Amino acid sequence: MRRRLLWILLIGLTLTGVVLVARQDSGTIAGLAAEDFGSLAYHIALVVFVGGTVLMLFRDRLSKALEAVLFWTLVGFVLALGYTYRLELRGVADRIMAELMPGTAVMRSAKTVEIVRGRNGDFQVAAQVNGVRTVMVLDTGASAVVLTHEAAKAAGLPLELIKYSVGADTANGRAQAAAVTLDRLTVGGIV
C-alpha cells in the first residue's frame, strides 16, 4: 500500500512537471497562471503526502485520525484569525492589561489615553519624565506637574540649582515648590 501511494504521488508530480514544461509559453494552464498552477500542484502533493502519512499512522484508529485533523485545522484557523485581527486584538490586550495593572495608560485615539482607577480610588499613572519611568498621581484639576525630590533626581533635573520659591496651594495646605522646565513628559503615547 505504501509503495503504491508513493508511486502515485511521484507519477502525479512528474505529470505536473511535464505539463508545466510543455505549456510554458502559453502562460496559463487550466485557466491558472503557470506559477499558480505549480503552487496548486505542490500544495495538493503536500496534502496527499501528509494525508497518506496520517492514514498510515492511524489506519486502525480512523476516528482518532479525524479528531487530530479537526483539532489541528481548528488550531490553524484560530492562528489565522488571530493574525488577521492582530491590530484590533492589541487594543483588547491593552485594555485587559490596564484593568489588571491600574495606572497603565491605554491609547484610545491619537490624543486620548484611558487610565483605570486604582484599588484605593486614585488615578496613578506610569508616566515618563525626561525618559525615566515615574509613577505619578493624576489630578485632572491640577495646573502644574509636581514631582517628588526622588523623581526629580531620577529625571536628571539639576537639584543643586533648584530654589523652592514658588508658593503652591495643595489639598494638604500651602507648600513651597520649585519651578523647572521638563524636556519631555509622556503618558501612554501622548507627549
Image: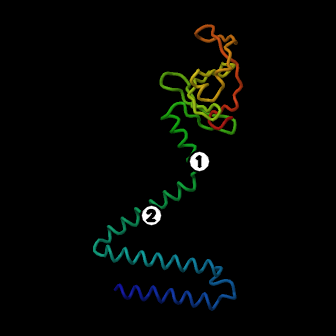
Q: Which residue is mark 2?
A: 73
**Residue at screen point 51% across, 86% down:** 13
Image coordinates for residue 155, horizontal then vertical, percent = 62, 29
Q: Quadrant of residue 17?
A: bottom right
Q: Is 83 placed left or right of 63 in the picture?
A: right
Q: Residue furthest left?
A: 60
Q: Quadrant of residue 8?
A: bottom left
Q: Which residue is mark 1?
A: 88
Amino acid of disc 1:
Glu
* Callout 2 touching callout 1 (CB < 8 Å): no
Quadrant of the frame with the C terminus? top right
In the rendered view, tell whether residue 104 sits above or below residue 11.
Answer: above
Q: Is 134 placed left or right of 119 in the picture?
A: right
Q: Residue furthest front?
A: 160
Say which of 32 and 3 sits in front: 3
Image coordinates for residue 72, horizontal then vertical, percent = 42, 63
Quadrant of the frame with the N terminus? bottom left
**Residue at screen point 63% across, 84% down:** 29
Say which of 83 and 154 sits in front: 154
In the rendered view, tell whether residue 78 sits above or below residue 36.
Answer: above
Q: Secondary structure at mark 1?
A: helix
Q: Residue furthest top?
A: 173
**Residue at screen point 70% across, 31% down:** 183
Amino acid of disc 2:
Thr
